[in-house]
Image (cartoon, rainbow, N blue to C red):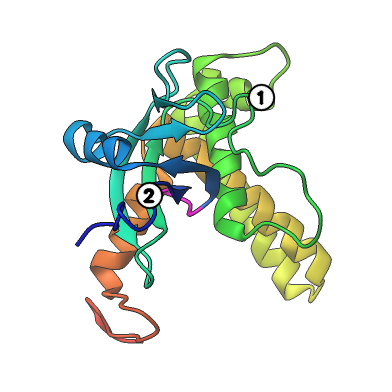
Amino acid sequence: MKPDFNKMPLIPAIIQDYKTGEVLMLAYVNEEAYEKMLEKNQTYFYSRSRQTLWHKGETSGHFQNIKYIALDCDQDTLLIQVEQIGNACHTGAYSCFFNDIQGEVGPSTIFQSVYDLIKDRQVNPIENSYTNYLFDQGTDKICKKIGEEASETIIAAKNEDRDELIGEIDDLLYHVFVLMAKKNISLQDIQNKLKERHQITGNKKTFHQKGEY
């Protein structure tokens, strides 16, 4: 199954981060761009302003490696999930959709943003960064902080203080993310393990490896 380009020479393509589900951009695809994507496994689009084919990342180095392509029910819109290298937007933003109007982003997007920032500190350390301090101190220090934050989370729960508990859980997650970055474990690795262990399919719960939920 493929788009009917005789009916619609240009169709929109929604580009999505395959790890977080964040929508990165929207662009248009003609038949040549579509065939190129299948061949090269990277995104190609048709520029309506320049009236020419363009390979995303060709000049910036911010390529999009394709992980999944789907066609909508009317067969006139593509959903493309990608591994984004660098930033998707020409402004330097990760996503083109950064002008907030209403509502709030979902938790998975926030988690990935925090984790990405921690990884960036690991590669590009800055002065007086607490994250870099933890990396410099090493695994023992990070684990010690996780233990402390876990204890403080328990105390906050016992105190029945919701706001305090939320803050302590936030601190605990941050330090766990630092440990994950230190050990080169991604959020995708954790998600894959959850799927493997809990066999989550749609809205159905199935069996844990040690028993039923």
In 3D space, how far apart are the residues under numbered discs 2 and 1 (Cα atoms)? 21 Å
Q: Is residue 81 magenta?
A: no
- Circle 1 residue: 91
Left or right side of 113 for 31: left
Figure check: 130 above or below 80? above
Foreground of the two, 48 or 147: 48
* Residue 59, percent from left and from top: 45, 12
What numbered label is drawn on residue 199?
none
Q: Residue 37's x, y, as percent?
A: 26, 37
What x and y, as percent, mark residue 117? 59, 31
Q: Secondary structure at mark 1?
A: loop
Q: Nearer the viewer, residue 29 or 190?
A: 29
**Residue 151's image quarter?**
bottom right
**Precedes in sequence: disc 2 or disc 1:** 2
**Magenta stretch, overall SS:** loop
The answer to whether residue 81 is visible is yes
For residue 80, the mark is 2
Q: What residue is at 46 percent from the left and 42 percent from the top? A: 28
Q: Amino acid at mark 1?
A: Thr
Image quadrant containing the C terminus: bottom left
Give 113 or 70, whichever is nearer the viewer: 70
Count residues near mark 1 (Cα–Cα under 10 Å), then give few for <14, some for 14-19, many for 20+: few
